[in-house]
Structure formats: C-alpha cells, structure tokens
Amino acid sequence: MLVTLSEILKDANERHYAVGAFNCLSQENVMGALEAAEELRSPIILQLAEVQFPEAPMEMMAPLYLKAAKRSSVPVCVHLDHGQSLETCVRAIRLGFTSVMFDGAALPFDENVAASREVTRIAKAAGVDVEAELGKVGNSGVDTADVFTDVDEAVRFVGSTGIDALAVAIGNLHGHYVHTPQLNIQRLIEIHEACDRLPLVLHGGSGTSEADFKACIHNGICKINVATAIQRGIMKRIGERLSQKPDEEYVPLKQVMIDASREVIAAHMRLFESEGRA
Ligand code: 13P
C-alpha cells in the first residue's frame, strides 16, 4: 500500500529501527525490492535521485514505482531523492510521489532554510512530506566530509522549515567507501534530542559497518539510503552469470537482476531491523 514518509517513519522512530530507502533504476530493481519487502514483511521506501534521471527518467519510473506500491501488501513510500530545485519537487508531487527531498545542503544556511521552507509549504498543500539536508554529505574520493551537521543550526532549521525528516552529515559519504567510515554517533544523539526526536536520515548507506548501522538505528536514524550496493550487487551477479557459459546464445538476465536486487535489499532490511514490522 502507498503511504507517506511520516507514516512509514513513525513506528521506526518509536521502536528504533530504520526503513531502507533503495534507489531503483529499473523494473527489475523495483520487482526485486518489492519481493524482498513482502518476503520479510518489511516496510520499504522506493526512491529515485535527480542525478539518476538521465539513466532512469522520473516520468517513466513514477508509474512503475506507484503501481508496485499500490499492489503491495506492505507499506511503500515513493520518494524523490536529492531534488535539486523547487521545480523538480513539484514535478514529483504532480506525478504522485508521497514525499520529496529538497537538497539545499550546498547553499548558505539562510538560503537552505528559505528554499526548504518554500518546498515544504507547497508539498504540504498537496499532502506530500518533505526531507531536507543540513551539513554536507560528500562523495567518496572527492570530499572529506568534514562538515558535520551543527546541532544548534539543526534546531533552527527544523523549526523554521516544518520538514518531516532531516538528513544529517555525521561522517557519511555517498558512493563506494575507500575506507569503512567511522560515524559520529555522539553528534547524532545530540541532534536527535535537540530536534525533539524528529526522524533522521542517513545517506550513503553502502559500505557502512554493521556496528555503525546498529548505532545509527538505535539513536534516531529511521531512514537509511542505499544505492551503490544494489547496482554493484547486480553487476557482480551479471558478471558471474555471463561467465558460467560464455557461448550461450541468450542469457535471461532480467531474472538475474531481480534476484540480485532482492538479495542485496533483503540483507539491508535485516541489518536495519525492519523485518516483520509490516
Ligand atoms: P550510497 O550510494 O552510498 O548507498 O548512497 C545512497 C544515497 O545516499 C542516496 O541518496
């Protein structure tokens, strides 16, 4: 069933687990994701980031996400990840997404507040929830992610924007980590307490250690974004399958992709302790 972000995160926030938000770029990805969610009776967030639109156009993916959500027996939120402008957020709202992320983290604080507040005002009028980001989650190999979310700024940001969930920077990075990161859990605890236990979001889930995942979900993180690990899992499985019988005329790769998506996503759901919550 299709639900909003705040609906899906409420129980996770109260009972200290996280709902996985999985970036899905194909029909096979979406099918594998929903199979994992239903097998494990787990809530799930399907999401697509604006930087992924060239590979997976939002207008083409939206009907697929929404159909999968509506026919599913578990709660599914359909979410825009890293919307870069108000216009992109409005496009997602019109397509039926139940939540949008506006990413103004690269903006000066006051501009991020103003833009996030405007997105929230419009989204709320349409019954859509909003995630925003404060502090900079860098890209692995590019940034050093030394710009953690500041606690006092987080309080002012949440109070001035009315958002439903806040993405924090606590040492996490997008992409494939060169070294396993060490997250700043103390900062996470301080932000969660200071922001009246607002649901917090961890970006850059791929490659995080099990210990850090557990510390996060027990201290305020209730949404964890995973993208790279899914695509790497699919690549690996396709490579293995193709090398089994190199002379085969036709290799049914769709099923390989569905199975790889399901396995990677199910493994993350177990780590995030969302199994059996739907
Ligand atoms: P990873 O690619 O590191 O899993 O990050 C995903 C993400 O944060 C999407 O917003």
Image: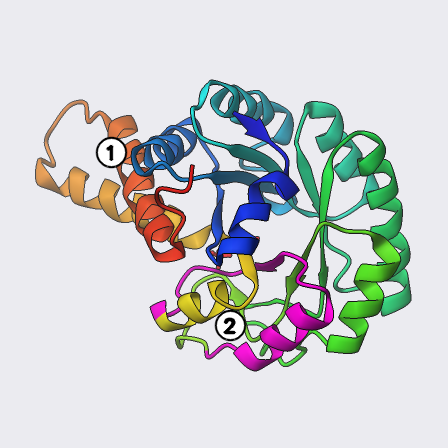
Residue 206, picture quadrant? bottom left
| Front residue of 69 and 192 | 192
Residue 243, picture quadrant? top left
Residue 182: x and y, percent?
A: 46, 79
Residue 24: x and y, percent?
A: 47, 38
Q: Is residue 219 above or below residue 255?
A: below
Left or right relative to 20: residue 9? right
Left or right relative to 269: residue 124? right
Residue 206 on the magenta span: yes
| Front residue of 250 and 226 | 226
- Three-letter code for the amino acid on which mark 1 is drawn: Val
Label disc, if present, on residue 256 of the rendered structure: 1
Q: Is residue 256 above or below residue 268?
A: above
Residue 94: x and y, percent?
A: 75, 25
Of mark 2 and mark 1, the one earlier in the sequence is 2
Left or right relative to 114: residue 54? left
